[in-house]
Image (cartoon, rainbow, N blue to C red):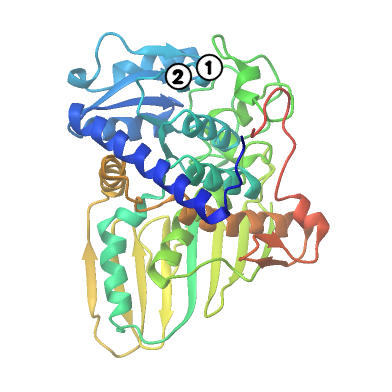
Amino acid sequence: MQQDISRRQFAVAAGGLAALNAASFASAQNRSDEIRIGLVGCGGRGLTVLRTFLRQPSTRVVAMCDVDQSRLTQAPKELPSEKSPEKIELLGDFRRLVERPDIDVVVVATPDHWHAIPALQAMRAGKDVYLEKPVAHTIEEGQMLLKTARQHNRILQVGLQQRSQEAFLEAEQVLRSGKIGEISLVHCFNVWNQTDPELTSYSISEIRRPTGREIGLGNPPDGDPPPGVDYDMWLGPAPKRPFNPARFHWNYIYFWDYSGGMQLIWMVHLLDSVRQMLDLKGPKAVHTSAGSFVMRDIRETPDTVITTIDYPNVTVVCSVLHASGFTFGGGRYDHGIQFVGSKATLMVDRFGYQLLPEVKKPELIRTDTPNTGTLKHVENFLTSVRTRKKPACDIEEGHISTTALHLANISYRTGRKIFWDSEKEQVLGDPEAASLSRKDYRAPWSLA
């Protein structure tokens, strides 16, 4: 006989089951103390993160997945010998990795259009996930990742490792001390000069030469994918298109089908740190002015971007310049954040921070720190896996940061300012813009 159950009784029961599940997992971890890892995406970033995991005690990689056989077969050779047993299962389909019952943690380090689906399936299979940034390819995907992590009581750490890095944590204390006074503006910047004409063309056979970080993409013709590449699987949920070397591997970031440009993939690091240091939630409005003013290559995303993000108490400006190497306000590297205050300006990047005073005042602080963000972030994630406490960059925080930059791209693509309801997580008064917060998926792929 069915009985009516009140919502409150159901919530209590569900909470009890979730707690039991977490306790059982923690108990199992305490018995063996070994965390078994599966990696999806064996490119440079994936291997860097995996090697960092394997530096920690009681970790072991048991399976690796990539659609490029050359990367997949080379990947185990790039791992420390003491953590790389002879038998690591090498797979071309992430679903075979996710279904393995002995895997505790799945690391997802794929192109952005392949972030959500493997992470969702891993969590539904009872795995915790370390997910590289940006959280997802659309706002809807980020919402689904957050919902699924909570439903299945999974730890989902987003690879926004500056939340765990000394330079940013120390700079936050300087900021909170009041030394810079009242903040009137925050400026995040990323600058790469990609204009060298001698390095802007390459042929289909030259897949392994330097990436778009140092050079332009050129305008190579379409052709056949390299031997050993499952190109249909690489496309996955993205629209079917002919293979082009400039759209492949690292350079995928410059194409809307797979990413959102550096405005999304790099700027999310800096904006997330701003949110952490100033306790910001979601934005009120976002406006982007951008274009491809210098680069004459195959890319779809703009080479020059200026975005203004309105928060309740501060304005944040995000600049992406790929035709200039100029660093703003004493910046020493190709990225940074300026917190502009009434007494001084605080500059911070991954290698330290500086307190730049008003004219005629002595310099107050300058420091340099090692770039250990990924190491600290992985350590934090593994602690969360064992304790079931939220990690430094829980999916909710990563989703909020990523959403603001999805809105920036939507603003650029529609040509107008986008107003956002952070509570309801929806675009206000603009159906066309709202439609760009989600996408269609090529069969058979979906978020379900």
Residue at image position (31%, 84%) is: 178
Q: Is residue 329 visible?
A: no
Q: Residues within 10 Å of mark 2 (few under 14, many from 20)?
A: many
Q: Position of residue 235 (x, y in %)?
A: 65, 25
Q: Position of residue 4 (x, y in %)?
A: 61, 46
Helix, strand or loop at label 1? It is loop
* Horizontal arrangement in the rendering, residue 182 relative to residue 35 (left or right): right
Return the residue nearer the eye: 366 or 148. 148
Residue at image position (77%, 65%) is: 416
Q: Position of residue 327 (x, y in %)?
A: 44, 63
Q: Quarter holding the N terminus?
A: top right
Return the residue nearer the eye: 426 or 284. 426
Check the image and name the residue furthest to the front: 1
* Horizontal arrangement in the rendering, residue 263 relative to residue 390 (left or right): right
Q: Which residue is mark 2?
A: 97
Q: Which residue is mark 1?
A: 93
Vertical relation: 121 (above or below) 360? above
The number of numbered discs placed on residues in the rendered structure image is: 2
Helix, strand or loop at label 2? It is helix
Q: What amino acid is found at the position of numbered circle 2 in the picture?
A: Leu
Q: What amino acid is found at the position of numbered circle 1 in the picture?
A: Asp
